[in-house]
Image: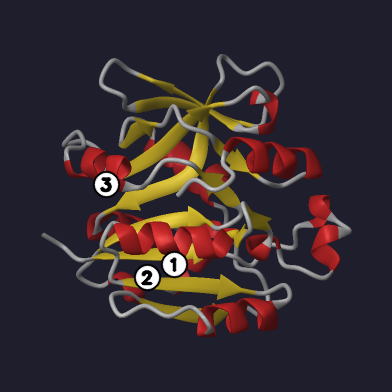
């Protein structure tokens, strides 16, 4: 069984959450009294992740200090600073060597997830042989603000609609992915090298992405309304 490593994307500006994020990076906004980044680190440790890489940019000193103060005997946590934002796919490409010999998770640290990660990892271990990526999906009440996916009877993604008006359904991409080293080989072979995961990578992989659906709350806390809802729905849960 391969070891598990994770990249936590924590570099965002959080502009829609201002003025809250003028002083606090989005990944450190608390849910149930715990910073989002801390929730993810705890969730990753609970499923046996051996190492985590956190990228930083906006208010990076605060994120670095938080990571320095987070201690674990079972999981190593490192920080990589981006003077200029590389994009979701660009960050993964720039740090692909971090995953050498390991299975990987790509997670947006400004999302909040009520479920644990074990279901996604089990699904990925059993993914369809044609797939190289497993995507978390959830139901959204704002489909035009999300990437909406269509899947076949085996849960394989066959169509993807990134933030379009009147998309066909409300099953959304949670922007949380499990992958094996073969996916990184594919990513590094792409030309030109991609920057954004949703718009440049996902459309090239239709028919090659397994989905895993969570019925528990899963939210991007990008707006004050979403943050309030996450506080209500997730609160003190793991």
- Residue at the limit of the structure toward the left, as seen here: 1
The answer to whether residue 91 is seen in the rendering is yes
Relative to 158, does residue 206 appear above or below in the rendering? below
Q: Position of residue 71 (x, y in %)?
A: 42, 80
Q: Position of residue 54 (x, y in %)?
A: 50, 72
Q: Which mark is residue 30?
A: none
Tell me, yes or no, whether the two marked residues, 2 and 1, touch with CB atoms within 8 Å. yes
Left or right of 38? Residue 136 is: left
Q: Position of residue 92 (x, y in %)?
A: 45, 65
Disc 1 designates what residue? Answer: 93
What secondary structure is found at the residue carrying circle 2? helix
Residue drawn at point x = 74 percent, y = 41 percent = 228
Relative to 110, does residue 199 appear above or below in the rendering? above
Residue drawn at point x = 63 percent, y = 52 percent = 31
Residue in front for this viewpoint, 133 or 1: 1
Q: Which mark is residue 121?
A: 3
- Residue at the limit of the structure toward the right, as seen here: 19
Residue drawn at point x = 49 percent, y = 30 percent = 138
Q: Position of residue 89 (x, y in %)?
A: 50, 58
């Amino acid at each position: 069984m391969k070891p598990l490593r994770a990249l936590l994307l924590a570099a965002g500006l959080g502009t829609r959450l201002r003025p809250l994020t003028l002083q606090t990076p989005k990944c450190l906004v608390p849910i149930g009294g715990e910073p989002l980044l801390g929730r993810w680190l705890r969730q990753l440790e609970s499923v046996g992740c051996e190492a985590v890489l956190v990228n930083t940019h906006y208010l990076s000193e605060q994120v670095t200090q938080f990571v320095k103060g987070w201690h674990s005997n079972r999981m190593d946590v490192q920080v990589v600073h981006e003077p200029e934002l590389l994009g979701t796919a660009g960050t993964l490409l720039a740090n692909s060597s971090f995953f050498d010999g390991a299975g990987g998770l790509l997670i947006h640290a400004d999302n909040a997830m009520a479920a644990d990660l074990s279901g996604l990892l089990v699904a990925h271990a059993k993914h369809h042989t044609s797939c190289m990526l497993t995507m978390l999906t959830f139901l959204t009440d704002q489909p035009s603000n999300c990437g909406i996916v269509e899947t076949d009877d085996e849960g394989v993604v066959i169509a993807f609609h990134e933030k379009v008006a009147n998309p066909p359904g409300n099953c959304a991409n949670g922007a949380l992915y499990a992958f094996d080293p073969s996916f990184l080989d594919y990513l590094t072979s792409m030309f030109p090298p991609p920057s954004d995961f949703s718009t440049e990578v996902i459309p090239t992989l239709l028919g090659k992405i397994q989905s895993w659906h969570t019925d528990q709350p899963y939210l991007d806390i990008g707006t004050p309304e979403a943050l309030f809802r996450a506080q209500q729905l997730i609160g003190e849960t793991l």
